[in-house]
Amino acid sequence: MDSVKLMNRSDTKFVFSNQTLLQILPKLQGYYRVLEIENIRLSSYQSLYYDTEDFQFYHQHHNGKTNRNKVRYREYIDSGISFLEVKHKNNKGKTIKKRIPVNAIQEMLEGDHQSFVDEVIGENLNLIPQHRNKFQRLTLVHKINKERLTIDINFQYQNTIKQGGVEQLVIAEVKQEKKSRSSDFIRIIKEAGVHPFRISKYCIATASLYTELKRNNFKMKFLHLNKI
C-alpha cells in the first residue's frame, strides 16, 4: 500500500451492477492482491463534504472547469483513522490529493484545519458542511504494476433533511501514476461490456440532495445510472 499511495495520479472510473462485480472478481485474482486489515477486506468509510453556501465547488465541476477542488473529512471506520483532505483536479486531468491526519471528523472547519485548506486552495473561502456519505470499499493492488484499484459498494448520502443512495451500483476506480489502458482490470471490465464513466460521488449526492441546483450537464449520467 505504501508503494501505491499515488497522491498525484490519473484516475479511470467505471460504474456497473453488483452482478457484474461477482462475474469479474474471480478473473482479478491472478493479477491483484487484496488489502486486508485485521481480517477485514470490505472496509467502511464515511466522509463529510464541504462547499461554499452557493456550492462553488459543485458548479465548477458541473460546468467542466479545470483546476477545481473538493474538501472533505474522511474517516476509515475500521481502523479508526481520519484525515482532512483537499482533492485538486488540474487542467491535465491529474488528481492531486493533500491531507493531514485529524482526531475525528469535525462539523466546522476551524483553526489549523481552516488554515490547511486555505493554504492548499490558495484563498480563504467560507466553507460549510453540505452532506455526508458512506460506503464500503474493497482495495486491490496490482502484483506488478504501480496501480491501485478501489471497488465501492453500498454508496449512501444524506444532509440534514434528506437521504438517498445507489446501493445497487458498483463504483470502481483505477488509480495510476500515468493513465494506461494496459491495466488488467480495464481489460477485464471491458470484456464484460463496461466502459469508462466519469462520475463524482460528491456531485451525484449533491445533485440528488439539493434538487434546486443546476444539473443539466449531469442528466445523461443519471440516465446511465438508472439504466444500470
Image (cartoon, helix red, strand yellow):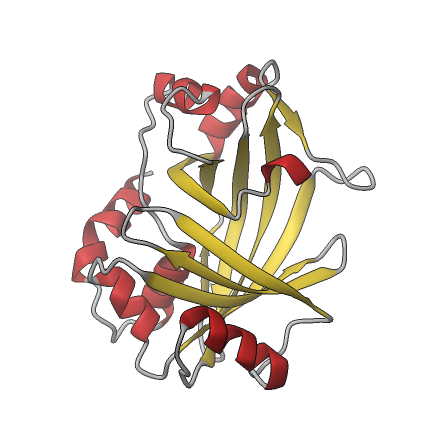
Q: Is residue 64 above or below residue 111?
A: above
Question: Does residue 1 show up?
Answer: no
Left or right: where 54 falls relative to 118: left
List x then y, in percent, for residue 110. 58, 85
Residue 28 higher or lower than 135, as above or below? above
Q: Residue at x 50, y 52 (%)?
A: 155
Nearest the eye: 170 or 114: 114
Q: Residue at x 61, y 18 (%)?
A: 29
Rendered location of residue 101, percent (x, y): 68, 64
Vertical position of residue 97 compared to residue 147: above or below: below
Q: Residue furthest left?
A: 216
Q: Residue at x 37, y 32 (%)?
A: 179
Where's the N terminus, which quadrant?
A: top right
Total labels drawn: 0
For the C terminus, the image quarter is top left
Please tell me which residue lies in front, 30 or 95.
95
Horizontal side of residue 138 vs 213, given as left or right: right
Horizontal and vertical percent position of residue 103: 73, 71
**Percent coordinates x, y for residue 2 in the rendering:** 67, 40
Residue 2 visible to an observer of this rendering: yes
